[in-house]
Image (cartoon, helix red, strand yellow):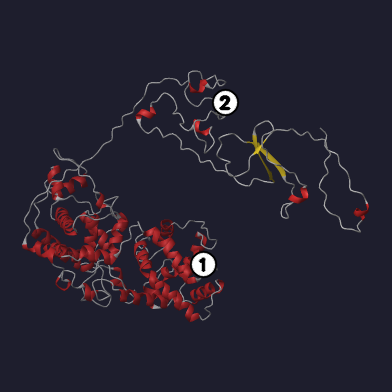
């Protein structure tokens, strides 16, 4: 039946233009089906009632069918019954209001075992059937299970298949060629060391050595407290701070460096304007890192040329930059290799060329310790400062971020740590006393450096004398212990001097106590086998093995002794230093006996300490009658085995 519906009209105010016109009449043709089933009432109002003040888009009526038994939409929307007997959901929407997250299922396990690695087909995904069910559905459900679409076929085969030309059929990609399994057996050489322990009874002296500390005033190192500038056996913190103060005064004597500090505070917009306060801030920060400056200066001296054995020249500086990881073209535009070379020249500038310091100790082509400290500060300002941060922060970042990480695994020879931990012990002192007569005679034989103005004082051993002694005793071990390492032992065995120019001879030479320390440092890294290794390999003693290695000869029935890892320069030392020193001094005495006592063309006489001492004393008398003892050229010294 046809029914006329009157649309709902809003009331209009009287007096308006719309009130004078009659209301429009709209006729709609509507089919009304009568049914006894209860239905929900739906009304569709005008769009103006649903306009949102924040979203001016017109709402859209959204409808989707309700599946009986589905739980995912339960309680979200009301359900409407349609005339065809089904149900649906209707709601207005302008955008997606809520999303339902469906978590991913874990993939099958990796074929880490032989069982899964040799299976003929790929493992089935156990969760594929569950993907077709909607979350929250309760079994039993007889729903359509959609098959996920497969990826497109590749254009070629990556695996070995039966027919490599067939790329159209999907099954061709799974038809793999059956190949026999191939196993590769790799043989690796494993070295096993069998240790044999022997029970020995300790002597009363050895028991006393292990239970008591060394009394330095009664040891072979007793004279060091009176000979050294520190007037002590090690460098105390008070002495190091006093040395820093002297180096700082020498830096501040240079006007250009004072301007560098002033300019650095200015570009960093620091609130500190007083120049004295600025210098005090930099000085206090250097107190925290001065020991690193001294350590690096001590180490890189041995890399300088023979013309500057106790200074740091430009070649040694470039080696330091490579080791510290400062590239040729740094990330800072002010810290390139060209800029550092200019800093090197500026630090070498001598304000008072006629001073005692510049005449005796300083050289315009190499850096002294205070100049090396100035260079470190200039590099810190150029790399980490220049307005980026405050000067004291730039110094801290340079040492903590650049210096410390680079020298952590680097062979830095610290003077006092070796003395306190390895050298100053009762056992080492006892070994040196056993060879005291020979060692003193050897030192007098090779020490040739006179002290100006002190004719009665004994001569000292300079660097050339030390290298000549190592050549005669064949104690170098190329490539592990060469000339550079020998120079480093010489430099590290000396005590520091606050003012090098006051006693430059002592600063550049070894006293007898320093000579003993240099032998200890050499013994700590020189590869000499232990008695147990010698006996198990068939050698009689260490000197027989030493001569065989020197002459590159072999002996029937003996085995080579591999180099121990602890013999490396920067490795952890496992043997007591006294054992190493004892072996080194034994080889040294017998090798010098073979060189000086044995006549040419005849076999070596049997070793005796008396014959060696007598020969050395004769050579001392012969050398004292001449004005200069010939020691050879340093460049012609050859390393031993």
Local crowd size for mark 1, using a 10 Å CA cut-off: few (<14), some (14–19), many (≥20) = many
Looking at the image, is mark 2 or mark 1 nearer the viewer? Answer: 2
User: Which label belongs to residue 385?
Assistant: 1
Name the spot of residue 185 as percent of width and height, x first. 31, 29
- Quadrant of residue 79 in the image? top right
The residue that disc 2 covers is 155
Coordinates of residue 303 in the picture (x, y in percent) = 36, 59
The image shows residue 13 at horizontal and vertical percentages of: 87, 58
Report the side of 555 relative to 508 (left or right).
Answer: left
Q: Residue at x 34, y 77 (%)?
A: 242
Q: Position of residue 551 (x, y in %)?
A: 21, 45
Q: Residue at x 21, y 61 (%)?
A: 520
Does the image show residue 617?
Answer: no
Horizontally, residue 130 falls left or right of residue 180, namely right
Q: Is 92 placed above or below 337 here?
A: above
CB under 8 Å between callouts 2 and 1? no
In the displayed structure image, the side of residue 539 where residue 28 appears, left or right = right
**Could you tell me which residue is drawn at 24 percent across and 58 percent down?**
522
Q: Residues within 10 Å of mark 2 (few under 14, many from 20)?
A: few
Q: Earlier in the sequence, mark 2 or mark 1?
A: 2
Q: Quadrant of the N terminus?
A: top right
Q: Nearer the viewer, residue 525 or 116?
A: 116
Element under disc 1: loop
Task: Work out whether 263 lies above or below 47.
Answer: below
Q: Nearer the viewer, residue 483 or 142?
A: 142
- Which one is nearer the viewer's eye here, 427 or 137? 137
Q: Is residue 259 above or below residue 90?
A: below
């Amino acid at each position: 039946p046809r029914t006329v519906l009157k649309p709902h009209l809003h009331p209009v105010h009287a007096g308006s233009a719309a009130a004078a016109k009659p209301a429009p009449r709209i006729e709609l043709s509507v089919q009304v089906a009568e049914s006894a089933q209860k239905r929900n009432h739906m009304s569709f109002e005008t769009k103006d009632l649903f306009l949102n003040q924040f979203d001016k888009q017109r709402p859209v009526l959204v409808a989707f069918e309700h599946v009986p038994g589905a739980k995912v939409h339960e309680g979200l929307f009301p359900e409407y019954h349609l005339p065809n007997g089904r149900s649906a959901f209707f709601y207005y929407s302008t955008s997606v209001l809520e999303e339902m997250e469906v978590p991913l299922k874990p993939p099958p396990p990796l074929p880490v075992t032989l069982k899964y690695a040799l299976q003929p087909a790929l493992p089935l995904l156990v969760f594929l059937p569950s993907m077709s069910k909607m979350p929250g559905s309760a079994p039993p459900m007889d729903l359509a299970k959609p098959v996920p679409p497969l990826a497109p076929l590749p254009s070629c085969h990556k695996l070995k298949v039966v027919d490599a030309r067939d790329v159209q059929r999907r099954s061709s990609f799974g038809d793999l060629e059956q190949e026999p399994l191939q196993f590769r057996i790799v043989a690796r050489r494993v070295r096993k060391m069998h240790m044999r322990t022997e029970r020995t009874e300790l002597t009363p002296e050895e028991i006393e050595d292990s239970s008591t500390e060394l009394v330095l005033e009664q040891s072979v190192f007793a004279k060091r407290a009176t000979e050294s500038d520190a007037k002590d056996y090690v460098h105390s913190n008070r002495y190091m701070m006093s040395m820093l103060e002297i180096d700082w005064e020498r830096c501040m004597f240079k006007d250009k460096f004072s301007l560098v500090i002033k300019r650095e505070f200015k570009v960093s917009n620091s609130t500190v304007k007083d120049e004295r306060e600025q210098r005090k801030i930099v000085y206090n920060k250097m107190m925290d890192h001065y020991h690193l400056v001294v350590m690096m200066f001590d180490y890189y001296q041995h890399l300088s040329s023979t013309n500057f054995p106790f200074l740091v020249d430009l070649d040694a500086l470039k080696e330091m930059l490579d080791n510290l990881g400062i590239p040729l073209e740094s990330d800072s535009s002010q810290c390139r290799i060209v800029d550092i070379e200019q800093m090197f020249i500026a630090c070498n500038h001598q304000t008072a060329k006629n001073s005692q310091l510049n005449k005796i100790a300083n050289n315009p082509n190499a850096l002294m310790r205070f100049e090396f400290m100035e260079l470190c500060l200039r590099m810190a300002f150029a790399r980490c400062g220049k307005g980026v941060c405050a000067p004291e922060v730039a110094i801290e970042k340079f040492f903590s971020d650049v210096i410390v990480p680079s020298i952590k695994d680097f062979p830095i020879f610290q003077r006092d740590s070796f003395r306190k931990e390895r050298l100053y012990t009762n056992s080492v002192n006892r070994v040196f006393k056993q060879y005291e007569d020979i060692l003193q005679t050897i030192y007098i034989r090779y020490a040739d450096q006179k002290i100006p103005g002190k004719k009665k004082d004994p001569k000292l051993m300079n660097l050339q004398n030390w290298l000549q002694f190592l050549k005669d005793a064949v104690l170098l071990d190329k490539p592990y212990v060469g000339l550079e390492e020998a120079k480093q032992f010489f430099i590290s065995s000396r005590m520091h001097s606050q003012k090098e120019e006051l006693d430059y001879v002592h600063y550049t030479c070894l006293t007898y106590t320093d000579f003993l320390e240099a032998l200890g440092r050499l013994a700590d890294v020189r590869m000499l086998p232990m008695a147990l290794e010698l006996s198990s390999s068939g050698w009689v003693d260490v000197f027989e093995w030493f001569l065989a290695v020197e002459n590159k000869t072999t002996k029937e029935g003996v085995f080579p002794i591999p180099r121990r890892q602890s013999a490396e320069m920067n490795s952890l030392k496992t043997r007591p230093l006294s054992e190493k020193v004892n072996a080194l001094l034994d080889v040294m005495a017998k090798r010098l006996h073979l060189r000086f006592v044995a006549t040419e063309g005849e076999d070596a006489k049997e070793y005796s300490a008396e014959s060696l001492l007598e020969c050395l004393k004769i050579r001392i008398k012969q050398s004292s009658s001449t004005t200069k003892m010939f020691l050879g050229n340093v460049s012609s010294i050859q390393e031993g085995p």
